[in-house]
Amino acid sequence: MPVISRRVFMGAAVSVCAGAPSHAMPSALVTPVLRLPADDHPTVALTLDACPGAFDLRLARALVDLAIPTTLFLTNIWIHRNPEAVSFLQNHHDLFSLQNHGDRHLPPVLGAVPVYGLPVAGTIAAIEAEVVGGAHAVAAVSGVAPHWYRGAAALYSPDALTPIGRLGFGIGGFSLNADMGASLPARSVAARIGQARDRDVIIGHINQPLRPSGAGIAAGVAALKAQGMRFVRLPDQIAI
Ligand SMILES: [Zn+2]
């Protein structure tokens, strides 16, 4: 199966209203839609974020037991707080591709208005520092330079996308939000994953072990796999 350029498959950016007054938000934020290239077998990509926080070991073990190739987006903060988790992921590098969720979990957003309560990077230089810092942290533990970046909150100032691309990163968009920021009960998460269609890129979280959403991810992907869905990692499917 050919690995195909992301440019062909990056869908149109979808405007997202962050709820800020227009005078404080000079331009709408975007969250790019990402889907996989067409293939001859129904295929999806599971992508899980490790923001700041802990490690959902039960979910990780379930993914190992189910042999689900998964793309993980790690922050530098999470890497330093969770050395045992990093070792676990390294021990299963055949399954887990480690990618870049930023240095300090600052949304790649210009200005000064927080996003979902998170302080934003604010300037292009700070966004670049966020991307580069996260990449160095991931490369230091995985031995492999990441080529995918997903910003904190998965929201971007449109003017940030080109500078991020110039640094050599594809934007880790998605097409199916499984857990809404790890906020949903397990049954809802499993049901949403059950709606996955061929070529979907699914987003969830692996940093909230005390919330029920992780069990929903495990149940959802188990059911999809039982139906014959194939799982792939982003770098294996789309070249940057
Ligand atoms: Zn995050």
Image (cartoon, grey):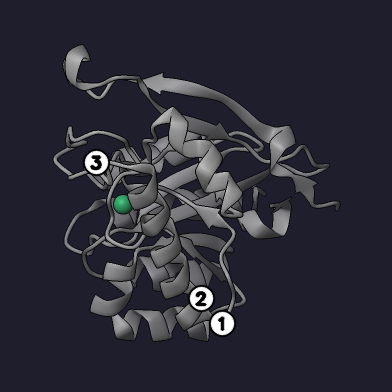
Q: Residue at x 16, y 62 (%)?
A: 210
**Is 21 left or right of 189, judged from the image as shown?**
left
Give the residue pinned by disc 2.
139
Determine the CA span between mark 3 and mark 1.
34 Å
**Is 109 left or right of 234, judged from the image as shown?**
left
x and y percentages locating residue 21 in the rendered image: 16, 15
Determine the CA span between mark 2 and mark 3.
32 Å
Q: Are marks 2 and 1 in contact (CB under 8 Å)?
A: yes
Give the residue pinned by disc 1.
143
Q: Residue at x 62, y 36 (%)?
A: 35
**Is 20 left or right of 105, judged from the image as shown?**
left
Q: Is residue 232 visible?
A: no
Circle 2 or circle 3, nearest the eye: 2
Q: Amino acid at mark 1?
A: Gly
- Toward the viewer: 100 or 41? 100
- Sequence-wise, the earlier of marks 3 and 1 is 1
* Secondary structure at numbered mark 1: loop
Q: Are marks 3 and 1 in contact (CB under 8 Å)?
A: no
Q: Residue at x 45, y 38 (%)?
A: 160
Which label was assigned to residue 184?
A: 3
Q: Is residue 192 above or below residue 99?
A: above
* Secondary structure at numbered mark 3: loop
Q: Is mark 1 within 8 Å of ligand 1?
A: no
- Toward the viewer: 109 or 16? 109
- Toward the viewer: 101 or 68? 101
* Secondary structure at numbered mark 2: helix
Determine the CA span between mark 2 and mark 1.
5 Å
Q: Residue at x 52, y 52 (%)?
A: 46
Q: Amino acid at mark 3?
A: Leu
